[in-house]
Amino acid sequence: MANTLTTLRMASIPFVVWLLSTASGTGVDARHAWALGLFIGAALTDFLDGQIARRTNTITEFGKIVDPLADRLLVISTLAVLMARNFMPLWMGILIVSRDVVMLVGAPVIGIKEREKIAVHWTGKVATSLLFLSLCFFILWGRKGYLQPVGFGLFLPGILFSYISGLIYVYRGIMTVKHRNQAEPDSSEVAT
């Protein structure tokens, strides 16, 4: 069931993109509303699939890989259309995506192994919630060249919390590597 929800989230992405791509650029129309409804529905599947997988002990390799991929693709594709249609300033989308890129590239650089998991921090959850709400306002009330004030007001603390959580994750990652390296014997000390 959890993997089905993840798959549905992936399948919804082209429809969100299409609806936003064809929505009115001068006012709110039905496509704005449908795009918002589908975006919210897709986001809810993210919450539900994780809950179902944990409660039914059906966590799979597919879910571990595709779930975060679906999340990022939903957000990045939505941002891309909002920026391309000039419903959201380019710099806002770049700030959101660049933090994710730094985290993705940074983990292997500092030495985080594939199976090491860094616990989610409350600042990351706050950031996700605020940025999600911000995107909802830009989706529904997006117009060309119009900076949606409520969306912008939610974006500012959201991006601040996003970068704070990023710094916390980097620190935790460095500490994880440090503790792992202290626990592993030095190869020069191992008797042969």
Image (tube, rainbow, N blue to C red):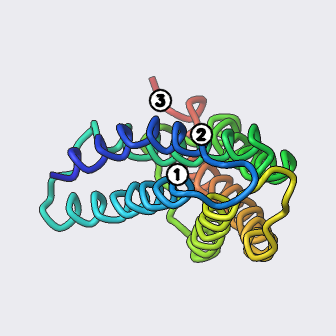
**Looking at the picture, does residue 52 appear above or below residue 73?**
below
Q: Which mark is residue 31?
A: 1
Q: Secondary structure at mark 1?
A: helix
Mark 2 crowdedness (10 Å alpha carbons): few <14, some 14-19, many ≥20: few
Earlier residue among tags 2 and 1: 2
Q: Amino acid at mark 3?
A: Ala
Find residue 55 and report its horizontal and vertical position in percent.
17, 67
**Looking at the picture, does residue 26 appear above or below residue 85?**
below
Q: Left or right? Give the position of 118 relative to 91.
A: left
Asked if marks 2 and 1 touch (Cβ < 8 Å), the reply is yes
Q: Amino acid at mark 2?
A: Thr
Mark 1 crowdedness (10 Å alpha carbons): few <14, some 14-19, many ≥20: some
Q: Residue at x 44, y 40 (%)?
A: 15
Q: Residue at x 48, y 48 (%)?
A: 71
Q: Amino acid at mark 1?
A: Arg
Specify the quadrant of the image occupied by residue 7. Answer: top left
- Specify the quadrant that holds the C terminus: top left
Earlier residue among tags 1 and 3: 1
Q: Extreme top residue here?
A: 192
Task: Please give the residue where the numbered disc 2 appears in the rendered image.
Answer: 22
Task: Please give the residue where the numbered disc 3 appears in the rendered image.
Answer: 191
Q: Which mark is residue 119?
A: none
Q: Left or right? Give the position of 119 relative to 99.
A: left
Find residue 142 and report its horizontal and vertical position in percent.
71, 58
Find residue 5 and report its horizontal and vertical position in percent.
26, 50
Q: Secondary structure at mark 3?
A: loop
Find residue 70 and report its horizontal and vertical position in percent.
44, 42
